[in-house]
Image: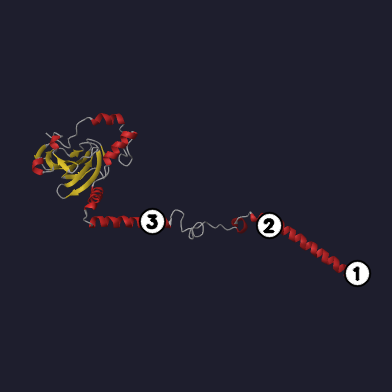
């Protein structure tokens, strides 16, 4: 009988122990829910976008596949429509052809935009004038002054002879900008050699050709009277340079606006 009583007491004690362990485990569970992977395992797992930030979102969050595909298709449609317009000789498409041709062939009016920006905000665009320090008062004062002479000298070839510009003989080592503007071309041309084309705020362009060296870079903003390049001086310390002024599609006689002698 005593043996059976001992067995019952052992069972009760075992149940109590099991119950105590169960309660301890349940109590510790909520604490573990607030532990991160790093705290539990001591391992850091950096985020990855190989499968998308939200598992299947399509890749990097800054790249959207549907937007990219739309841009590609839209570009293809534009190219296709343009090709159809230029292949079709119907009068209906003539205005469209002219507009597309003009937008592709005509230079952007950098000088006009720069001048408008200064008039509106009082400071130059950093793209055009990174080192300009003139204030608006000095700018307004120079607007009424006549054009600067690129380089004083003798006109050897007139506008009537050349059809586009003039050739000037000079003893000056460099040519200067007739007015402020933006350099839109700087390099070799078939007819005028090493040439600089300067675009002005009123839409006109001045050409300075037959140079020996260029001292400015493409899209530089230059003020009136700034040296643009070196002339080709011979042994007698004289050289010739080409100068032209273009307004719209037509060249005008430079002697009508500038006195060279």
Label 1: how many residues lie within 10 Å, few (<14), some (14-19) or many (20+)? few
Contact? badges 3 and 1 (CB < 8 Å): no
Where residue 140 appears, x then y in whole percent?
Answer: 27, 30
| Mark 2 → mark 1, Cα distance in angstroms | 41 Å
Disc nearest the viewer among 2 and 3: 3
Q: Which residue is mark 1?
A: 2
- Residue on which the image places disc 2: 29
- Alpha carbon distance from label 3 to label 1: 89 Å
Q: Which mark is residue 70?
A: 3
Report the quarter where the N terminus lies.
bottom right
Label 3 neighbour load within 10 Å: few <14, some 14-19, many 20+: few
The residue at 24%/43% (across/down) is 183
Coordinates of residue 111 in the picture (x, y in percent): 26, 40
Q: Quadrant of residue 259?
A: top left
* In this view, the mark in front (3 or 1): 3
Of the two numbered discs 3 and 1 on the same chain, state the one appearing first in sequence. Answer: 1
In the rendered view, would you say 54 is above or below 4? above
């Amino acid at each position: 009988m005593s043996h059976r009583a001992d067995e019952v007491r052992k069972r009760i004690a075992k149940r109590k122990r099991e119950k105590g362990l169960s309660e301890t485990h349940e109590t510790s569970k909520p604490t573990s829910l607030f532990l991160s992977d790093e705290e539990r395992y001591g391992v850091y797992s950096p985020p990855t976008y190989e499968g998308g930030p939200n598992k299947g979102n399509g890749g990097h969050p800054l790249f959207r596949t549907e937007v990219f595909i739309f841009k590609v298709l839209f570009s293809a449609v534009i190219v296709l429509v343009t090709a159809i317009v230029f292949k079709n000789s119907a009068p209906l498409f003539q205005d469209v052809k002219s507009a597309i041709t003009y937008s592709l062939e005509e230079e952007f009016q950098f000088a006009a935009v720069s001048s408008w920006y200064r008039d509106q905000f009082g400071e130059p665009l950093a793209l055009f004038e990174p080192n300009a320090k003139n204030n608006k008062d000095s700018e307004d004062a120079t607007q009424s002054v006549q054009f600067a002479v690129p380089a004083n000298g003798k006109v050897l070839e007139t506008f009537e002879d050349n059809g586009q510009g003039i050739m000037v003989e000079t003893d000056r080592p460099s040519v200067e900008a007739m007015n402020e503007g933006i350099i839109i071309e700087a390099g070799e041309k078939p007819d005028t050699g090493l040439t600089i084309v300067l675009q002005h705020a009123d839409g006109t362009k001045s050409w300075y050709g037959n140079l020996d060296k260029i001292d400015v870079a493409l899209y530089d903003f230059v003020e009136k009277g700034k040296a643009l390049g070196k002339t080709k001086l011979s042994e007698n310390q004289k050289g010739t340079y080409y100068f032209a002024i273009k307004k719209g599609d037509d060249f005008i006689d430079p002697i009508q606006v500038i006195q060279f002698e």
